[in-house]
Image (tube, helix red, strand yellow):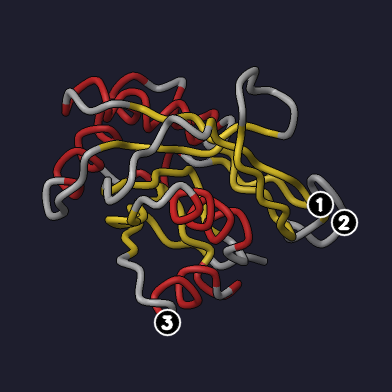
Amino acid sequence: MNLKDYIRSIPNYPKKGILFRDISTLIKNEKAFAETIDQFVARSKKFSFDKITAVESRGFVFASAVSYVLKKPFIMLRKKNKLPAEVHSVDFELEYGTATIEVHKDSINENESVLIIDDLIATGGTAEAAAKLVEISKGKVAAFLFVINLFDLGGSDKLIQKGYKVESLVNFPGH
């Protein structure tokens, strides 16, 4: 199954010049969604890790399913002010703005290895922030898994240059 066939491209969203890769069309197809989870599970078995994490919100869709299949704890990286207990916070740049993500301070223990899953990597700002949250928590990043790599925007290359392991299920140009 070619997962690219199930990802819709929407020009000029959320602003002019952006070609948005919409995974809602992949998720609503039960066979394509199952294939995506199966591919994530197969790829994740290459890495040794204790927990799975993902960034709100689309990453949750995939990471929670992989967590269930692999029987691994799932840690949510949430937008600012969405977690009720003490948090670590990281501010970061997006392709079209800025944001903050947070994790509960008691979610990741020292030396735990964490697999980070998200729907897409573009410029790498969100992924780098996720890695920082894991590392601030004294954990280690086992690897990153993405559904989509927007290869010409450089985020995946940036992560690899920093020594992280990175895999994506499909590649698209960013524009």
Q: Percent x, y for residue 79?
A: 68, 33
Q: Under tag 2, what secondary structure?
A: loop
Amino acid type, mark 1: Asn
Amino acid type, mark 3: Gln
**Left or right, 97 with reference to 84:** right
- Marks 1 and 3 sit apart, C-alpha to C-alpha, by 30 Å
Q: Percent x, y for residue 104?
A: 53, 30
Residue at the bottom extreme of this rendering = 161
Dot label at residue 100? none
Which residue bears the numbered disc 2?
16
Q: Earlier in the sequence, mark 3 or mark 2?
A: 2
Q: Percent x, y for residue 84?
A: 65, 17
Quadrant assignment for the N terminus: top left
Note whether 11 is above or below 56 in the view shown.
below
Which residue bears the numbered disc 1?
12
Query: What residue appears at the point 67 percent right and 49 percent down from the top-left corner?
Result: 20
122 or 81: which is nearer to us? 81
Q: Nearer the viewer, mark 1 or mark 3?
A: 3
- Find out whether the residues at labels 2 and 1 contact each other: C-beta distance under 8 Å: yes
**Left or right, 107 with reference to 110:** right
16 or 167: which is nearer to us? 167
Amino acid type, mark 2: Lys
Query: What residue appears at the point 38 percent right and 56 percent down from the top-left corner?
Result: 170
Q: Under tag 1, what secondary structure?
A: loop
Q: Nearer the viewer, mark 3 or mark 2?
A: 3
How would you rate the neighbour count of disc 2 (Cα within 10 Å): few for under 14, some for 14-19, many for 20 or more?
few
Query: What residue appears at the point 51 percent right and 34 percent down from the top-left corner?
Result: 105
How would you rate the neighbour count of disc 1 (Cα within 10 Å): few for under 14, some for 14-19, many for 20 or more?
few
Q: Percent x, y for residue 98?
A: 80, 53
Dot label at residue 161? 3
